[in-house]
Amino acid sequence: MKLLLLCLAVAYVAGQVPLPCVSPRQFEGRFMRYDEQRQLQEYAKISYDEDQRRVREIEEREIGSERDYYDKLYLHNIGLEYRFNLKTRQCNVTAISRSFTPFGVPNGANFSGVGVLGLSGAPNEHVNVEFFEGRYENNPYFIGVTQPGCFPVQFGYYSAQTGYDHRTFIDVTLGVPDPNVFIPPTECIG
């Protein structure tokens, strides 16, 4: 009888742990990224399409006192990266140097906590965030997503290939209204 009660208690507690939610497969928004080691600070607009494995980032990048502006298009579906410097009008087209990393909660993610951004308990003054962590392609990551909705708020990922990538997402909207954002700049074609 005690064993049965213990099993029921464990099942009840396990049932209270949030399971990974399904993040939007297409979205637009902005993100901020800071890399202390390289003294790199970025602000970017992002268009994200997980189904076709495409990402476009229009970014303002500051390294030390140097400031640059880039239009970066990652077409993982065909293995090409377009990097267009908006100041110099120079475009580099190369094979993609890193694997596609989804900005959602991967299958097998482990729940690590919950929190509130903003004023807790006040109507329209806060958002609930669930945090998950785990490994993606054998590399550690964490992600914080809104609840409900499962929109990314914070994302961190480390690989030997790319180093540490930590982003804070803001102004995220569902979908990509203009699919032409995934067409390379005309300066990069031809």
Image (tube, rainbow, N blue to C red):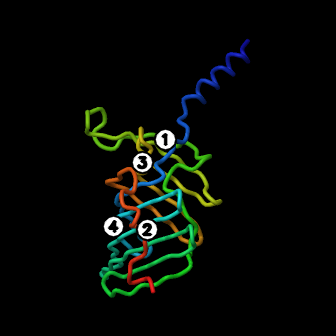
Which residue type does callout 3 highlight? Phe
Q: In which quarter of the image is residue 58?
A: bottom left
Which residue type does callout 2 highlight? Phe
> Mark 2 or mark 4, which has the lower sequence index?
4
Asked if 175 appears above or below 16 in the picture, the reply is below
Residue 151's disc is 3
Residue 123's disc is none
Query: Disc 2 and disc 3: Cα gap in Å?
Result: 21 Å
Residue holding disc 1:
113
Q: Where is residue 85 in the image (x, y as percent from the top left)?
A: 36, 82
Q: Which residue is drawn at 39% across and 67% down?
A: 181
> Mark 3 or mark 1, which has the lower sequence index?
1
Residue holding disc 4:
43
Query: Disc 2 and disc 4: Cα gap in Å?
Result: 19 Å
Pointer 3 local density, CA inside 10 Å: few below 14, some 14–19, many at least 20? many
> Mark 2 or mark 1, which has the lower sequence index?
1
Give the camera-side residue of 78 and 145.
Answer: 78
Query: Disc 2 and disc 1: Cα gap in Å?
Result: 35 Å
Residue holding disc 2:
182
Q: Position of residue 27 (x, y in %)?
A: 41, 54
Give the camera-side residue of 95 and 181.
Answer: 181
Q: Which residue is drawn at 53% across and 75% down?
A: 80
Label 2's element?
Answer: helix
* Dots 2, 4 in contact, CB < 8 A: no
* Dots 3, 1 in contact, CB < 8 A: no
Q: Nearer the viewer, mark 1 or mark 4?
A: 4
Which residue type does callout 1 highlight? Gly
* Dots 2, 1 in contact, CB < 8 A: no
Q: Nearer the viewer, mark 2 or mark 4?
A: 2
Query: Disc 1 and disc 4: Cα gap in Å?
Result: 27 Å
